[in-house]
Amino acid sequence: MIEGSPKPSVETGEKHAETLASIRDLRGDLHMHSLASQEANDDRGTYTVEELASYIRDHVGIKEGDQPGVEYISITDHATDDKAIPHGPEEAVDRRILAQKAEIDRLNESGKFPGLTIQAGIETALTPTGNPDVSDHVLEQLDVVITSIHEPPDLPGDKRVEMYRRVVENPYVDILGHPFGATWWGENFDWLSDEQAREVIDLAKAHDKAIEINAAQLDYYSPAIMQAIADSEVKVSFGTDTHDDPKIKVNEPLGTSGWRPYVKTAELMKEFGIRKDNILNTYPLAEYQAWRQARIEKFTTATE
Ligand SMILES: [Zn+2]
Ligand SMILES: [Zn+2]
């Protein structure tokens, strides 16, 4: 069970009180998309990075002490696998990602968002060769690197495990995004069996990568998988995978739609006893960055 959670002062009934306690422990969202990920023919509203940060500041709240709130958000747009994103030559993709990082640096330095840090990240696509679709020299400069399968390759499950086996060797990848399956536009993709999922969890643990608990894809986290995650003590990353308006709305009354993914995910993590110190989102920002940096150093010195 999650320990050391402060007792909430709000009277919301026992079930909600328990959940609130863990929500207070979460300091940020490690998976959010901005306008740069807007898909063709997608009429959902999307936000620029500045609009996302303003929304968080004005409607969610910046974390102070043990009050619920957000200390950081992570912009993890797709790199090349989104319909609206020009696939273009690699240099063009690199330039676009680094331009967004420069924009994020400017916003962080602007003083518009005191107490809130915007992390520059990316959600790379895991290619059948087991590589992210962005070059290492770009990934190295970012704060959060997720790698995810989006179009399940026409490969048997054990070959898909091989993709993960290769990508965990990449020093700059932090998080395996929704690794077990996902639903896109009403179509279900369940790309690993529970047994293969266990292999991927073990690979992540051995290489100090986090397994994402994706709030938008909770159906793919079976009890067996959740138990394996908890038992393995692998690091876990919580992401809303926001594609339209930000999904964290901690100051909204419980029960409204904004709460649901956050509450459900927190409840799930508690139910299976995922330890707080294995949940990256409970780390203060500096600790998260130190975790990423230490792993990169371990990887790069080992291969020198
Ligand atoms: Zn994704
Ligand atoms: Zn995503």
Image: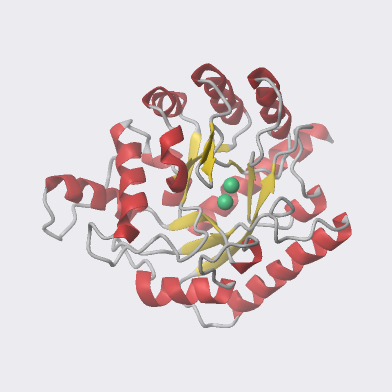
What is the tally of numbered marks visible in this picture? 0
> By what rule are the colours in the image chosen?
secondary structure
Note whether residue 105 is visible.
yes
Q: Position of residue 47 (x, y in %)?
A: 54, 71
As drawn, 91 above or below 223 = below
Which residue shows up at 54% across the image and 68% down it? 46
**Nearer the observer, 228 or 218:** 218
Q: Looking at the picture, how far across and down is residue 225, in whole percent? A: 44, 26
The reply, left or right, for residue 279 in relation to residue 196 is: left
Where, by quadrant of the figure, is residue 33 drawn? bottom right
Does the image show residue 1?
Answer: no
Of 8 and 298, the residue lying toward us: 8
What residue appears at the point 27 percent right and 66 percent down from the top-left corner? 252
As rendered, which of 279 and 160 lies closer to the eye? 160
Residue 175 percent coordinates (x, y) = 59, 42
The residue lying toward the viewer, choosing from 283 and 55, is: 55
In the visual, does 250 lie left or right of 228? left
113 vs 94: above or below:
below
Dividing the image into 4 quarters, which one contains the C terminus? top right
Q: Residue at position x 52%, y 17% from top?
A: 195
Q: x, y percentage for residue 96?
A: 77, 65
Q: Quadrant of the N terminus?
A: top left
- Kindly indicate the quadrant of the structure image that contains residue 184: top right
In the image, what residue occupies the spot 51% across and 58% down? 285
